Amino acid sequence: MKRVVITGLGAITPIGNNINEFWESIVEGKSGAAPLTKFDTSKFKTQFGCEVKDFHPEEFLDRKELRSYDLFTQYAIAASDQAIQDSGLNLKIMSEAERSEIGVIWASGNGGIGTFEKELKEYHTGDGTPRFSPFLIPKMIVDIAAGVISIRNGLLGPNYATVSACASSNTAIINAFDTIRLGKASVVICGGSEAAITESSVGGFNASQALSKRNDDPQGASRPFDETREGFVIGEGAGALVLEELEHALARNATIYAEMVGGGMAADAYHLTGTHPDGLGAMLSMNKALKEAGINASQIDYVNAHATSTSMGDISELKGIKRVFDNNIIKVTGTKSMTGHLLGAAGAIESIISILSVRDNIMPATINTLHPDKEIPEGIDLVLHHSRYEPVNYVLNNTFGFGGHTASSIFKKYQ
């Protein structure tokens, strides 16, 4: 099998709109939560979230493109542009044959939900005449971001979207990894984007009791593993990675951030929205990733947990981690405490965190966890309050989604 490395990164997040800003905020433990500004929340149970701030799409898209693309696609374009530039790939001088070796696998859980909501509102407040925008369907469908990234850059390789709820972009990264290892592409632009801070989305998550309602303390609301946690904080944005076959990267003298060595996917097969109480699916996907990487659990330096700050999810994941790591002490962090939950883009953003952790030997903290849950299994060493500066050779990154989807990826120092 071919080896796969990461040569480019890009990020649009609630705590920074480029990799350097984002990573600095993560290391410093900054929260991106604040009162929502996208719509009137006065009648909503939850009135805050982690919105992207100071995003100016007109800086890289013309008026026609702005009308054609939903916000989730705009985020995807911005993040992928950054990652491609960061990788040093000069697409403009590449031949058709070379560009046919570069694919795009992009994820989103909700796609153009903002566009769909807007168009439906306008229809119902009108006279009943169906005056829908000709851009409605291409703005809304989940695969369109992958298509637009391909069109924008002339990329002719494998091109599609992955949807597995909040595991979507980790699934996309694992698929990109497999595509390169099997020789079906030399480079894949992958990741995910989400722009689901809308009335229907927030209202729907409120109805399912999934969101925190700590309106008086937005920045302290996402508190994974804390006994007072009561729901996740919704976020938005995008994360992009350039995965590349090692020899291809070396031939062009590319900068290598880290190597990807394993990816595992499984299912809880348990409940529509809840996780298996003993972390069955989580355990299976982690074990599959470890097996593919050819390493033992004891070699993992820390786990970047899915850790959404929900009452059931956090503990079930830790039970799954305990089953994998058995009697080993394992460090665990929950970075959604800072970013909020980016839904379908979460896996990409947290993969970027994992990769930069490997590069810089930094384990980011879980913030806001003041009273660790008494059900946390023995052997779990939560990285709390402040980042730890320790050697990081291997990181395991978990993401899970409604429907029981589980995905785990492993990144290591490139040698």
Image: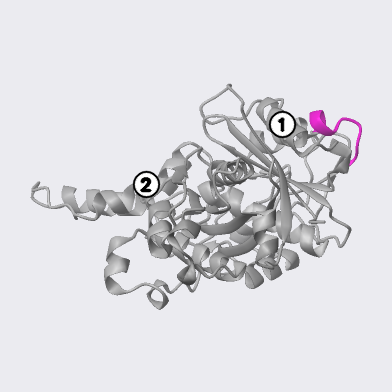
Q: Which residue is mark 2?
A: 200
Q: Quadrant of residue 262?
A: top right
Identity of the residue furthest to the top in this view? 270
Instruction: Decide: is 95 above or below 395.
Output: below
Q: Quadrant of residue 277?
A: top right
The secondary structure type at the circle numbered 1 is helix
Which one is in front, 40 or 5?
A: 5
State the extent of the magenta-drawn residues as a range. Answer: 322-329
Q: x%, y% of residue 293?
A: 76, 39
**Is residue 8 shown in magenta?**
no
| Left-right relation of 133 to 42 | left
| Discs 1, 2 touching: Cβ within 8 Å | no
**Crowding at mark 2 (Cα within 10 Å: few <14, some 14-19, many 20+):** few
Amino acid type, residue under disc 1 in the picture:
Lys
Name the residue: 29% across, 51% down: 138
| Left-right relation of 267 to 387 | left
Mark 1 vs mark 2: which is more N-terminal? 2
Which one is in front, 85 or 236?
A: 85
